[in-house]
């Protein structure tokens, strides 16, 4: 730990402790950050089960492309989760919240619902009842979106301000690992069961049942974690549940809009992410135009893309721990700028 001298506007000097590189690394080993790490895996696991993995299952089962296209709508809960976020924030879960606290009670409930939804989906047959599969996928997405709400609140309330960057880096890294497990991992499991002589439908059922077992990672983490101290206070403005939900929803918007330059911050976030969003859309076409095949691109994204995401996430949390936030934003802006600047020759 080092100390730097800060000169205030009045001319007085104060000392501020600056974290050392060792402190920046050891933050990842703190129990609170490790809890967020495992919850990140739990959050990333369900995404492919109602998305890309499900599409592969449906296509192999002979479902037409038009029906598969409509299945993109099952992801709507992820977009609309703000609608029931005040309910999660203001109300307790019967029995579970009394035993575990509000946040952990909601976590376990959403994870139990998620496990049940995946099991339900495992025993559906896309070739026979695609709309029943759609209902199961919608349940998975709803439970997953609810879990995301609770994990976000749990992360913010559990970690100290100096731990937030490391917690987010850990969350993003294991979120990606969860997606790989339910994406490529599920496909490997299905292929393995087929090689052992199981029918296609049975192999997919076993694959989804295996994914349901991975939900236990989140449940065990939630039970073993410590309830955030602030969680028991939020939302107890009155005895009427509807009034509490409404009060929490209004308070959330007022709290944000009351902050200095709230609208400017929103605009800043949009433009700061613009380069990254642009690159995400254009990278595939750019790589194909350079002469690489689609399989080459897929292999690189699965292997090196995941590695780059993990390294970048932890490096970002490490830098944010060691340097002021303004410095970190400048570093991130510069790296985005250079990554989105292929040069003139790349586009010729």
Image: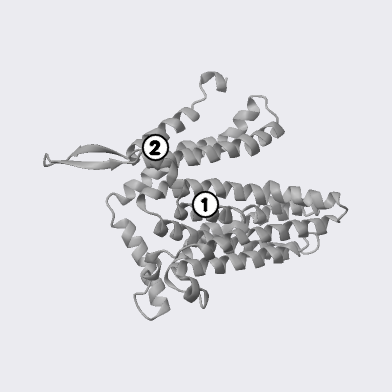
Which residue is drawn at the image coordinates 65% and 33% (left, top)?
A: 300
Relative to residue 333, is residue 261 drawn left or right?
Answer: left
Dot 2, how many residues are within 10 Å of its Cα: few (below 14), some (14-19), or many (20+)? some
Q: Please determine whether, in this image, residue 215 is positioned above or below residue 2.
A: below
Q: Please determine whether, in this image, residue 327 is positioned above or below residue 56.
A: above
**Along the viewing direction, whichever of 87 and 132 lies nearer the viewer:** 87
Residue 279, numbered circle: none
Which residue corresponds to mark 2? Answer: 21
| Quadrant of the image containing the C terminus | top right
Q: Position of residue 272 (x, y in %)?
A: 41, 39
Which picture quadrant has residue 145?
bottom right
Q: How is the image coloured?
A: one colour
**Along the viewing direction, whichever of 1 and 261 lies nearer the viewer:** 1
Please count the marks in the image: 2
| Quadrant of the image containing the N terminus | top left
- SS at mark 1 in the image: helix
Which residue corresponds to mark 1? Answer: 37
Dot 1, how many residues are within 10 Å of its Cα: few (below 14), some (14-19), or many (20+)? many
Can residue 340 be spotted in the picture? no
Can residue 74 be spotted in the picture? yes
- SS at mark 2 in the image: helix
Q: Position of residue 19 (x, y in %)?
A: 34, 41
Q: Position of residue 322 (x, y in %)?
A: 37, 39
N-terminal of the two: label 2 or label 1? Answer: 2
Relative to residue 255, is residue 82 drawn left or right?
Answer: right
Q: CA distance from mark 2 to mark 1?
A: 21 Å
Q: Position of residue 327 (x, y in %)?
A: 34, 36
**Between marks 2 and 1 in the image, the one whose residue lies nearer the viewer:** 2
């Amino acid at each position: 730990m080092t100390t730097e001298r800060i000169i205030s506007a009045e001319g007085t000097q104060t000392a501020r402790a600056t974290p050392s590189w060792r402190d920046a690394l050891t933050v990842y080993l703190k129990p609170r950050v490790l809890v967020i790490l495992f919850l990140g895996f739990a959050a990333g696991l369900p995404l492919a089960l109602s998305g890309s993995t499900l599409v592969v299952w449906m296509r192999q089962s002979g479902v037409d492309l038009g029906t598969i296209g409509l299945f993109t709508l099952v992801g709507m809960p992820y977009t609309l989760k703000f609608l029931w976020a005040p309910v999660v924030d203001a109300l307790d879960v019967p029995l579970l919240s009394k035993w575990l606290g509000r946040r952990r009670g909601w976590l376990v409930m959403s994870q139990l619902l998620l496990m049940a939804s995946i099991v339900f989906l495992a025993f559906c047959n896309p070739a026979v009842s695609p709309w029943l599969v759609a209902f199961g996928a919608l349940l998975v997405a709803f439970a997953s979106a609810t879990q995301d709400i609770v994990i976000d609140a749990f992360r913010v309330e559990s970690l100290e301000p100096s731990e937030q960057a490391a917690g987010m880096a850990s969350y993003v890294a294991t979120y990606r690992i969860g997606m790989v497990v339910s994406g490529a991992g599920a496909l490997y499991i299905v292929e393995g069961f087929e090689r052992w002589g199981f029918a296609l439908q049975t192999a997919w059922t076993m694959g989804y049942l295996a994914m349901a077992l991975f939900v236990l990672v989140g449940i065990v983490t939630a039970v073993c974690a410590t309830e955030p101290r602030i969680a028991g206070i939020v939302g107890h403005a009155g005895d009427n549940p509807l009034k509490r939900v409404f009060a929490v929803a209004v308070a959330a918007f007022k709290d944000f809009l009351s902050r200095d330059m709230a609208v400017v911050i929103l605009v800043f976030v949009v433009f700061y992410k613009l380069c990254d969003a642009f690159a995400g859309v254009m990278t595939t076409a750019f790589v194909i135009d350079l002469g690489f095949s689609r399989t080459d691109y897929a292999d690189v994204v699965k292997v090196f893309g995941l590695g780059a995401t993990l390294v970048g996430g932890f490096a970002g949390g490490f830098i944010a721990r060691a340097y002021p936030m303004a410095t970190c934003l400048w570093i991130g802006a510069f790296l985005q700028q250079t990554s989105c600047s292929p040069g003139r020759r790349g586009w010729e």
